[in-house]
Image: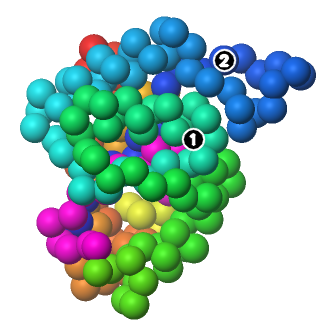
Amino acid sequence: MEIYLIRHGIAEEQREDVKDEERKLTKEGKQKTEKVAQRLAELDLKFDFILTSPLVRAYQTAEILIKTGLGDKLEESTHLAPNGDISAWIADWLEPNTQTSKISPETKLALVGHEPDLGNWAELLVWGEVKGNIVLKKAGTIGIKVPEQATPLGNSQMFLLTPPKYLL
């Protein structure tokens, strides 16, 4: 299975009159995210499922992925909200008797969320521990191959780390 960790696009600055979870993508954020999504589509990437943080900026990013034809199944996951728990996500999506009826070794999942969580998740999947070395830029993508038979934590392989500037 392949997991693509995708950070939301450029969002409105934090302000006292707008809750963090309600911050939207800016015009520039939408445009750059659309360009990145178009480039991913040109690379023949298609997701079987797109899971997104419930925060507005991440959900808008996921909607752009859908609009661009990168997938058609969109689902919110509270695990992808800031400070989400990767172990709980793995239990819900990757362990037997859960969502696995939807998942096969060929499945491609897009997980749309936030930093530093996505970088931390990538490190946990690849190295089994957070080192604080992977930083995912806004609208950037990390691709990780998850093993079929072993626990994914510390046993996965990163095959893609792309800041948006290389896709624009």
- Mark 1 residue element: loop
What residue did someone put label 2 on? 12
Give the residue at x 41% y 35%: 63
Tell me if I can see residue 117 in this picture. no
Residue 29 x, y percent position in the rendering: 49, 16
Residue 166's tag is none
In the rendered image, the vertical position of residue 52 relative to residue 27, given as above or below: below
Residue 166 found in image quarter? top left
Residue 135 shown in magenta: no
Tell me if I can see residue 151 in this picture. yes
Please give left or right for residue 64 compared with residue 143 in the image: right
Please give left or right for residue 120 compared with residue 64 in the image: right
Magenta residues (range) = 102-122
Query: Disc 2 residue type?
Result: Glu
What residue did someone put label 1 on? 114
In the rendered image, the vertical position of residue 34 relative to residue 78, given as above or below: above
Local crowd at mark 2 within 10 Å, few (<14), some, or many (≥20)? some
Question: In the rendered view of the protein, which quadrant contains the N terminus?
Answer: bottom left
Residues tagged 1 and 2 counted as in contact (Cβ below 8 A): no
